[in-house]
Amino acid sequence: MAAPKNKPTKPNHLYKIGFGVNQTEKINKAANAVNETPQQFIKNSTLNGAEVINAAAGLVKKK
């Protein structure tokens, strides 16, 4: 049986992610440490992680 295909993601679309109690506490603690909202912290962390992966793959030139 073939696996179902995932729907493509939409750029600039706000997706809601559910976290457990422990994950929420850790995100809030980290967001407070850098003085950001949890939503902004997740966005920045994701973008930083993507930049690191792209840099390691040699896909992006430094600005």
Image (cartoon, rainbow, N blue to C red):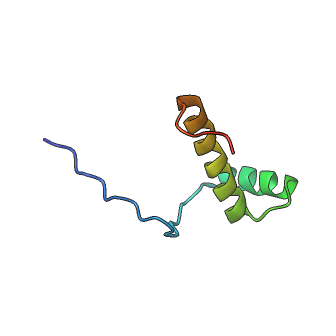
Q: Residue 42's x, y, as percent?
A: 66, 56
Q: Look at the picture and state if 4 lies above or below 54.
A: below
Quarter of the figure that contains the C terminus: top right
Q: Left or right of 20: which side holds 12?
A: left
Q: Is residue 30 visible?
A: yes
Quarter of the figure that contains the N terminus: top left
In front here: 57 or 39? 57
Q: Left or right of 25: which side holds 56?
A: left
Quarter location, residue 6: bottom left
Q: Left or right of 17: which side holds 8?
A: left
Q: Is residue 21 visible?
A: no
In front here: 22 or 54? 54
Q: Residue 39's x, y, as percent?
A: 67, 64
The residue sitting at 86% across, 53% down in the picture is 33
The residue sitting at 72% across, 53% down in the picture is 27
In front here: 40 or 38? 40
Q: Look at the picture and state if 13 lies above or below 7.
A: below
The residue sitting at 67% across, 50% down in the picture is 45
Quarter location, residue 49: top right
Q: Residue 34's x, y, as percent?
A: 85, 54
The residue sitting at 57% across, 36% down in the picture is 53
Total numbered labels: 0
Quarter location, residue 50: top right
